[in-house]
Amino acid sequence: MTVPLLNLTDMIKKTFLFGLVLLVAGQLLMAQSFQIITVSADGKKTSYALSNVQKIVFDNKTMTVNMKDGTDATNITNVSFSEVTGIESQKVESSIFIFPNPVKETLTVNGVKKDATIKLYGLTGGLLQTIPAQENSTNINVASLIPGVYLLCIGEQTIKFIKQ
């Protein structure tokens, strides 16, 4: 019994199709870019290409985004990330941001509407505290909590943080 060999034409067609698939996949990947979106205290949103961001600095309850070109974005209350595919922008699901995490004394929550309620739970499910959200940011004193993992429930969103 002999096994038929692929003829040269079939082999060229398969190689061409494989090359075409790789080319299209490469073009799709190159069209993707990631953005960092900052929200300032006055509510202004600004998008930056993530490839242009040098670092994000958290210092003394302030947040600064250092850009590679030497400019800085300051007075920021929120940072979120988004993926742009070249076809359509992906919407950011949440603009709620907490810091520092892990925390020792004061946890800052940004991006919560003023009329919202922040609920603090232990991992056993017990409600420890209910905090009304403030205008721009809400500070929560967690100094009295024992070290461990805790949950903040804000509307339908749950955020985990660590108390040191």
Image (cartoon, rainbow, N blue to C red):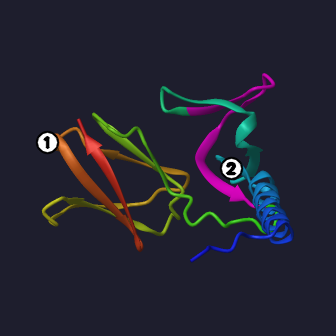
Quadrant position of residue 90: bottom right
Which residue is depicted at the point 37% across and 40% down? Answer: 101
Which residue is depicted at the point 80% across and 59% down? Answer: 19
Label 2's element? Answer: strand
Coordinates of residue 149 in the picture (x, y in percent): 22, 49
Return the mark for residue 37: 2
- The residue beneath circle 1 is 146
The amino acid marked with disc number 1 is: Ile
Q: Which residues are magenta?
A: 63-85
Quadrant assignment for the N terminus: bottom right
Q: Residues within 10 Å of mark 1 (few under 14, many from 20)?
A: few
Coordinates of residue 74 in the picture (x, y in percent): 68, 33
- Farthest residue, direction bottom: 1
Which sits earlier in the primary sequence, circle 2 or circle 1?
2
Quadrant position of residue 157: bottom left
Q: Residues within 10 Å of mark 2 (few under 14, many from 20)?
A: some
In this rendering, the answer to whether 107 lies above or below 82 is above
Coordinates of residue 79 in the picture (x, y in percent): 60, 47
The amino acid marked with disc number 2 is: Ile
Which residue is depicted at the point 75% across and 48% down? Answer: 46
Q: Provide the major secondary structure of the magenta segment.
A: strand
In this rendering, the answer to whether 164 lies above or below 80 is above
As measured in the structure, the alpha-carbon distance from the residue carrying label 2 to the one carrying label 1 is: 34 Å
Coordinates of residue 117 in the picture (x, y in percent): 38, 67
Which residue is depicted at the point 57% across and 34% down? Answer: 63
